Every structure is written in structure tokens, then in C-alpha cells.
Amino acid sequence: EDQVTQSPEALRLQEGESSSLNCSYTVSGLRGLFWYRQDPGKGPEFLFTLYSAGEEKEKERLKATLTKKESFLHITAPKPEDSATYLCAGYGGATNKLIFGTGTLLAVQP
Amino acid sequence: DTEVTQTPKHLVMGMTNKKSLKCEQHMGHRAMYWYKQKAKKPPELMFVYSYEKLSINESVPSRFSPECPNSSLLNLHLHALQPEDSALYLCASSPRGTSGTDTQYFGPGTRLTVL
């Protein structure tokens, strides 16, 4: 069964304390791995799309990487405004739809 | 510009009411999606329209009825909902139909409460 698993469920960081969020996937024939940020009560905001193992993308303090089994979202020197739920989703397999992980709730304290 | 708009932002309805949610995008995208999201859960796919034709219905109850009048507009008609249907309803669009490699861009959502 196609599946996306994110860890940890929740992460609390001090401002400036770098860390990584993990997204493990078992999606046959993965055609795209997507990262979104979601603030409470709002729609997911697109961050990155990764298509092949070894690919990396960066945006401000965020960097996403992809291997054949997992993706990481690295957050460098986070700020309180980076606090949000980060969702990972894979597209592929037989379902022809995005398969979401359950998200990582990130809290960055000043 | 990657903007998807949704109206209304909030909706409260009784179980006997009929209401509609509206979604618009003017990016020329050819696939549009409805998702349902409960608190602390990821979005769940409900319907997909590709080139204005319904291509995926995730076995959604008939009290939810989607409509795609044109390539920019997507509606979700609601009738005889249950309290457990209360959720954040999200619309999304992607450029080239359901190719899988295209990014889906989400709207801000409609917060629906069923009394």
C-alpha cells in the first residue's frame, strides 16, 4: 500500500536552532514529492517539488532533499514565523492522487 | 501569480439547508480539486476535475455534489449535511490536468460548520 510517514509529529525549537523534518515514503513509481506549509485554519502553501533522488531545492531558511526512500526538510536558523505544520505528499502508485503524510507541527520559540 | 480563491471563508448551515462553495482560479490551470480537512489531519481528496470533466470521485456521499461550469470555476453543492461533515474544505488547481508531476496550488479554504 502506498504510504507517506512524517516524523516527528511535533517539534519545538529555539530561535536559531537548526533541525530537520523527515518524510519517509513507500509510493510505487513516485512521480513527485511535494512539501507544503500550513498555518492554522488556512490552506497549504506550496514550498517545493522534488522529482528524482539526489535533487535538492532551497528557499530562504528551508532546504528540501530527496532520496529513494525519504525526503528531508532542513530548517536553518529558524525564526518564530516559521512555526506551522509542514506537510509532505507523494504522487505516484496506482492511486493517481497526492498521498499526504500526517504532518509535523513545528513551533519555534523566541 | 498562483492564487486560488474560495468563497465564503466561513459557512454555518443547518442539516436541512442547501448551500454552495465556490472556487476560482485564473492561472489557466486545467485540473481542479476538492479536499476535505479535519482538525489535525491531512487533506483528504474528494473530487478531481480534469479539463472540466469529473475524473476522480473518492466515493463521496451524494450530499456533496461537484460542478465545474468552466475551466476557471469549481463549485461544491451541499445538501442535507451531517454535523460530522464540519471541516475545512480546500480547493486546489494544477496546470496540466492530473499528470501527477504538476504542483497543486491550494486556496485558503472554507470553514464549514454543520449544526
Image: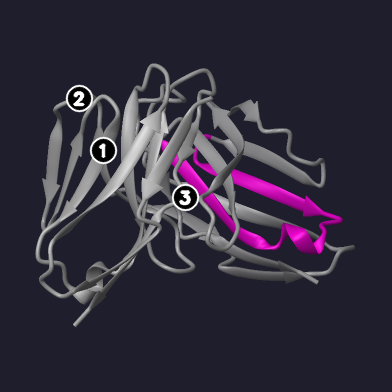
User: Which kind of residue does numbered mark 1 sit on?
Assistant: Ser
Asked which quadrant contains residue A28, the reply is top left
Depth order, front residue of A36/A77: A77
Residue A13, percent from left and from top: 22, 71
The residue that appears at 73% across and 33% down in the rendered structure is B59
Marks 2 and 1, how far apart at CA? 9 Å
The local crowd at label 2, few if under 14, some if 14 to 19, many if 20 or more residues have their Cα within 10 Å, is few
- First along the sequence among labels 2 and 3: 2
Residue B69, percent from left and from top: 63, 38
Q: Which mark is residue A71?
A: 1
Residue A70, percent from left and from top: 28, 34
- Report the side of B74 relative to A19 (left or right): right
Q: Which mark is residue A53?
A: 2
Q: Are marks 2 and 3 on the same chain?
A: yes
- Chain letter behind tag 2: A
SS at mark 3 in the image: loop
Q: Would residue A97 be counted in the magenta stretch? A: no
Q: Would residue B77 be counted in the magenta stretch? A: yes
The local crowd at label 3, few if under 14, some if 14 to 19, many if 20 or more residues have their Cα within 10 Å, is many
SS at mark 1 in the image: strand
Q: What residue is disc 3 on?
A: A102
- Report the side of B21 relative to B99 (left or right): right
Describe the colour scheme in one phrase.
Answer: one colour
- Chain letter behind tag 3: A
Depth order, front residue of B20/A70: A70
